[in-house]
Image (cartoon, rainbow, N blue to C red):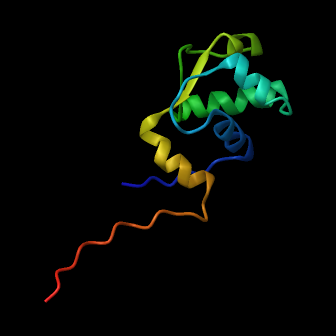
Amino acid sequence: MSREINLSGGEITLLKTMGLSGTPVHGKVLTGRIGGMEPAEFLDELNGLIAQGYVLSDKVSLHSMEDVQHTVFRVNASYARDLRDALHPGRRREEKSRRRRRE
């Protein structure tokens, strides 16, 4: 069951920085890697990903960059495959073909 996910440029940047493997990323590391984004845009995109359930965090509300630095994030494993497809739309997975019996 494939879901159609549409992501903005900021969301794509955040997800690529975090990685899709589901390993935890500390907020301090994440903010260090994202350097080029404005803090307000960064918080807005991150809160959007958390609200949609694509990213999980150990804190409920993130209102400042200080909150982000003391939080651990990871990509939700149940969405990882669909997010990977959304990040690389040209490389859609082929549906598994059924085995055919030779006669």
Quarter of the image with the C terminus in it = bottom left
Residue 31 lies left or right of residue 47; in this view the side is right
Judged from this view, the residue extending furthest toward the front is 102
| Depicted 62 relative to depicted 42: above or below | above
Quarter of the image with the N terminus in it = bottom left
Q: Where is residue 83 in the image (x, y as percent from the top left)?
A: 54, 47
| Depicted 54 relative to depicted 92: above or below | above
Query: Where on the picture, by quarter, is residue 42?
Result: top right
**Residue at 21% across / 79% down in the picture?**
100
Q: Position of residue 45 (x, y in %)?
A: 69, 33
| Depicted 34 relative to depicted 57: above or below | below
| Depicted 53 relative to depicted 8: above or below | above
Query: Where on the picture, by quarter, is residue 46?
Result: top right
Residue 14 lies left or right of residue 39; in this view the side is left
Q: Where is residue 52 in the image (x, y as percent from the top left)?
A: 53, 35
**Residue at 66% across / 10% down in the picture?**
70
**Residue at 55% across / 27% down in the picture?**
74
Q: Nearer the viewer, residue 47 or 17?
A: 17
